[in-house]
Image (cartoon, rainbow, N blue to C red):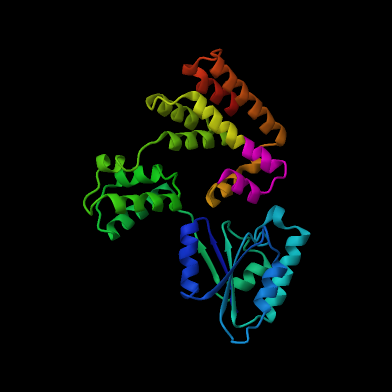
Amino acid sequence: MNVYLIACESFVLMKNEINKIVPSNSNVIKYDLRQNTLDDVLAEASYFSLTNEMKYIIVKGASFFKAGKNDSEEGNKDAQKLENYMKNYNPNTTIIFACYDMPDKRKKIFKLINNENNYVEIPTLNKKELTYKCMDILKSEGYSTSYDVASYIVDNSYVNYDILMGELNKIFVLLPKTELTMQNIKNIISLSVSNKTFTFINAIIARDLEVACSSIASFERLKTDPIVVVISLAKEMQIYLNLKQGISAKDIQKNYAKEDWMMKNYLAHLDDFTEKELKKIITILNSYDLGLKSGTIDKSVALDLLALELCA
């Protein structure tokens, strides 16, 4: 049976795993079930080429493998359609479902794929595991380094494998193969304002006052204007509100030029707020923006007050 399911949160690792299945120079067709239907996929899969050419179909956005709220009537119908196809599949077509969330392993559709040993799961690495992974990658490229240096690189990659690989590629291009020290790494990977703004925004979303305050201390060291942080946070909250109000993730991604991993982060936290809460937060941020610009709010305490108000 040529139906695969790959579960992995990393886009880089997902691509690597797909490449193990799909030979180079193959006929590859891609679908996204947030834009297409499973019927489109199965119609393409069932089509027999006159030349018997092997065809590989990569499918993203399949929600019927997940549990909970995705157990809709439509999702169950799609699962049944896939089951029916698997009973009489096209041997010249391989379908690969690329899922960035873990599937519900109790589902019949999962068990059918898993029983054929066609399920691949790549677990998400925690901070410690990713740090050792970073050291291994550096070593394989001819670099040596300490755990502390690797940990610094991971921290400034948001403990995200895909971003980490981007940072490592910068090192491979800019630094000779030698021992990496904290000093030469900081010349390449800095604790930038954008990094800290990202951390602060995530802390506000998670209502984590301790992390938010730590970010504020970094802003002070970097002499960051609080207005920049407030405006950045307001833009992020506006994206959440737009999603809450029914604007599609596809349109949001296009209009705001967001990466796939960013959209995944938005959707993962969307249920953390109600529409009413988001409107209230945006109103608060607008009042801070006005207060900072008019001088009625002291810049030295503005972010501390904001964090207390939003993390309460």
Above or below, comparing residue 92 to residue 99 in the picture: below
- Residue found at the far right of this picture: 73
Quadrant where the image shows the N terminus:
bottom right
- Give the residues in magenta: 238-257
Q: Residue at x 58, y 58 (%)?
A: 102
Pick the front one: 297 or 207: 297
Looking at the picture, tell me which residue is in the foreground, 182 or 207: 182
Is residue 291 positioned above or below 142 on the image?
Answer: above
Q: How many numbered discs?
A: 0
Specify the quadrant of the image occupied by residue 7.
bottom right
Compared across the picture, whether 164 is left or right of 59 comes to left
Return the x and y of residue 160 as percentages of the image width and height. Answer: 45, 49
Tell me which residue sits at (70%, 45%) in the image: 247
- Magenta part mainly helix, strand or loop? helix
Q: Quadrant of the C terminus?
A: top right
State whether residue 42 appears in this view. Answer: yes
Residue 190 location, x and y as percent? 35, 38
Magenta run includes residue 161 = no
Quarter of image, res 5: bottom right
Vertical arrangement, residue 199 with respect to residue 230, above or below: below
Question: Taking the image as drawn, is residue 207 in sight?
Answer: no
Q: Quadrant of residue 188?
A: top left
Give the residue at the far top of this rendering: 296
Counting from the top left corner in percent of width and height, residue 273 is at 66, 37
Residue 192 x %, y %: 40, 36
Residue lying farthest to the left in this orientation? 178
Q: Residue at x 59, y 19 (%)?
A: 290
